[in-house]
Amino acid sequence: MDSLRNELAHAEITISEKMNIYRILMEQSRSELQYDQATAENRKLIALAKSQNDDLALTKAYVYQGVIYNNQHDYKNDRVYLDSARVFALKSKSEIANAYTDYLEAIMLNSYQDYEAAIKSFQRTLSIVEDTNEEFLKAKIYYNLYSIYTNWNDMENSFLYANEAVKSAHKSGDKSLLSNAYSALAVAYTYRYDAHHNKDDLEKIFDICRQAIDLNKQYKGQVSTRTYAIAKLNIASYYFKYYPEKLDLIKAQIHEALEAGQLTQRNQAIIASCYGMLSEIAQREQNETQAESYLHTAYSILLTENPIYLHTMIRICDALATWYDKHDQHEKSFEFQKLTTDYTRQLFNEEQAATAKRLEAQYQFDKKEQELLVLKERAENHRKQQLLSIGLGIVGLFGSFFMFRSYHFRLRYSLEREKQLATEKSEAELQVKLEKEEQSRLKAEQKILTLQQEKLQNEVMANQLHLQHKNEVFQQLKEKIDKDNVMNIQQILRNENLLDNDFEKAKFQIQELHPNFFKTLTEKAQQKLTPLDLKYCAYFYLGMDTKQIANLLNVEPKSVRMTKYRLKQKFGLDTETDLMEYLRPDILNQ
């Protein structure tokens, strides 16, 4: 970055080159999560574009700033900069400017998790810039499309767009962007190798990772340190996954990632992940003391971050709980297991708040877009009315000079008057349309609130089962520790971890894939279902057998079988119908 700033001091540098340097500096700061610095660099770009009255450059700069705010989940300010970008795009009369505003719109839709709408906006942008030299924008679009299809586990499209991102990033000259594109392509090759086990794909993974790493050596200062640290951590992870015996090589890659991660701020999650991997390696080498030390180091580093990156913190606390349980230090194991639960609950609450924030932002976005469409219709009608008024004025002027032809001109005036009345009628119909749209907006807003409330109720019901069971397990652990009876605690924790995994998968299905699961149960039942009935239904949905449910609820297996028989009666099922099969959402919703 210092070398780029030195270039700005050269007198012979052109305005276009200076703008490109500001963009690269802004992009590097943004990728380092240094958003204040990124904004400062972008303001210089905005000022330079204004001094040159360059509306296209201003449009791009406002789009960059909108992306910076969107990365911080500041959905109010990213909308402000989208509106500003549209103003200057209109002034520029440039299709490229419109492509940039469509790109920011797609970024916003992607952050709202409206992926289908985001893909349409990205594709619309591509259709404009596909035959241009806007390689930076094309690489960004391809990278985002890769990300969406990767989340959907669409291996074919994931590989396609990662490959296109590498091509465009290479042409753009942005080395950080190219390094990220290489990392994306390496991930795409892992999908291909895991699916087909082709040795060529495995070699490609490491070849592409090395290309991403070598960019930092070839172009000093042009690849962000965070991007380089992630590339190093990625190749270490791939060696650990595919060549676990190469421990010395893996450790060397991890230590280089650590050194890079410590050069800038806000890399605690990367550094903690490095120590987590070192702990796993130490355990393989049977160096348990070193393994514990690495995990505590990772834990301490994560505590320095504000806010704490909860996903990594949960993994580290869980690893510490497992390590202490393995070494029969059950009080410490219990302490970190409790921390794992607390951080999991905190993550759940934060995700709920983020979901509500996204829904509100998306509603405001859709509302603003609808208002823009209405304003465009009004402007078009107003333009037509003005043209009509001018025409009527001309007709009147000619009529005053040619009174002797009054009949002829009266006839023409009558025709023009009819057109004016038709326009006024159109305006009245538009007003009625606006009123109907306002009513639809109010209904949509009420529907959103209702859906949010139903989703929260369902999620609370699902998590209540989980938390209740966790409390019972903790109580068992406490009683066993008090009685100095530790023989079965390790088995309890192992079973609990297995149950956690099953429960998380089931909870995702109930909450996300089948959000009306509990509501549908209540509607299908011919008799009223109690909270205990709903709990039994959830356990049957999880696929638990009679013995597992009896152990969880501290009841006799006979009581579970009786409850199962009673539930079949409440749903009006005959003796031949299997209750667990009936509780499948695809059958339940029929």
Image: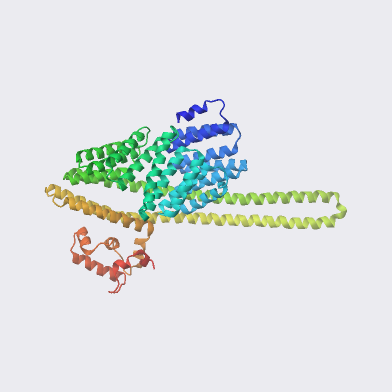
The residue closer to the viewer here, 403 or 552, is: 552
Residue 14 location, x and y as percent?
57, 30
Identify the residue at image location x=28%, y=68%.
567
**Measured from the top left, where is residue 296 in percent x and y?**
25, 38
Residue 112 seen from this side: no
Of 287 and 536, nearer the camera is: 287
In the rendered view, does 273 fall on the left or right side of 2? left
Place residue 585 in its image quadrant: bottom left
Q: Residue furthest front?
A: 200
Name the residue nearer the viewer: 301 or 257: 257
Report whether residue 340 is seen.
Answer: yes
Q: Colour mode?
A: rainbow
Q: Position of residue 20 (x, y in %)?
A: 53, 35
Quadrant location of the N terminus?
A: top left
* Residue at the extreme right: 404
351 relative to 39, above or below: below
Q: Which is nearer the eye, 523 or 184?
A: 184
Q: Is residue 408 left or right of residue 16?
A: right
Q: Position of residue 528 (x, y in %)?
A: 31, 66
Tell me the residue at 69%/57% (across/down). Answer: 422
